[in-house]
């Protein structure tokens, strides 16, 4: 069998891809407690029903997100001015953190976007932020 020769750049790209995949798996494992709503079609995303979470779930979700941000995305602290680290106050809503996560193609963007879909007053999770911003604090069963 003929040996495949890779350039230095190709080797570096393979290593970076493996590291990125390992990082994504580590991040996803932090959120293993999150149960994704089963949605046939797009009725959840279209606001036809929602998921009632608990205050404990919401706080655990935020704390896990903060832990992951402080561990995996330290570079964002400098760009946002949060040099002391991330807190609940500086990650909620449409902050620059989400923009940096999105622009940086971070696997944490998925989790940041999910926290933006949970109402911090009644802990209802919606299928998109649009409905969370217009939350009337009424649980809609599937």
Image: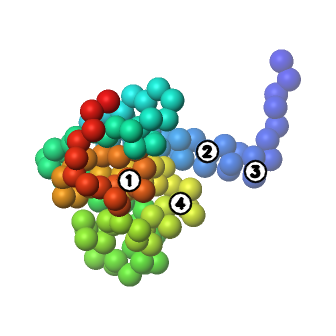
Mark 1 or 2, closer to the camera: 1
Left or right: where does residue 13 sit relative to residue 102?
Answer: right
What x and y, as percent, mark residue 84?
28, 76
Give the mark nearer the N terminus: 2 vs 3.
3
Which residue of the protein is positioned furthest toward the bottom in this rendering? 81
Give the mark nearer the N terminus: 3 vs 4.
3
The residue tagged 1 is 131
For the residues labelled 3 and 4, the Cα–Cα distance comes to: 29 Å
Mark 2 or 4, closer to the camera: 4
**Quarter holding the N terminus?**
top right
The residue tagged 2 is 17
For the residues labelled 2 and 3, the Cα–Cα distance comes to: 14 Å
Q: Residue 84 — which label?
A: none
Give the mark nearer the N terminus: 1 vs 2.
2
Give the residue at x 38% y 81%: 81
Which residue of the protein is positioned furthest toward the right in this rendering? 2
Query: Mark 1: few, some, or many residues within 10 Å (few <14, many ≥20)?
Result: some
Mark 3 or 4, closer to the camera: 4
Corner quadrant of residue 120: bottom left
**Label 1 element class:** helix
Residue 15 makes an appearance in the image: yes
The residue tagged 4 is 102
Q: Relative to 15, does residue 67 appear above or below in the rendering?
A: below
The residue tagged 3 is 8
Corner quadrant of residue 83: bottom left
Left or right: where does residue 91 sit relative to residue 45?
Answer: left
Query: Mark 2: few, some, or many residues within 10 Å (few <14, many ≥20)?
Result: few
For the residues labelled 1 and 2, the Cα–Cα distance comes to: 36 Å
Residue 64 makes an appearance in the image: no
């Amino acid at each position: 069998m003929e040996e495949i020769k890779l350039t230095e750049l190709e080797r570096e790209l393979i290593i970076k891809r493996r590291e990125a995949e390992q990082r994504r798996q580590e991040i996803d494992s932090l959120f293993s407690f999150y149960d994704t709503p089963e949605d046939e079609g797009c009725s959840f995303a279209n606001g036809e029903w929602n998921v009632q979470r608990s205050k404990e779930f919401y706080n655990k979700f935020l704390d896990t997100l903060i832990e992951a941000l402080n561990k995996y995305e330290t570079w964002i602290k400098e760009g946002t001015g949060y040099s002391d680290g991330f807190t609940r106050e500086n990650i909620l809503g449409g902050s620059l953190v989400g923009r940096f996560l999105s622009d940086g193609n971070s696997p944490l963007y998925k989790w940041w976007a999910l926290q933006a879909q949970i109402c911090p007053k009644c802990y209802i999770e919606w299928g998109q932020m649009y409905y969370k911003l217009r939350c009337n604090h009424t649980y809609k069963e599937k």
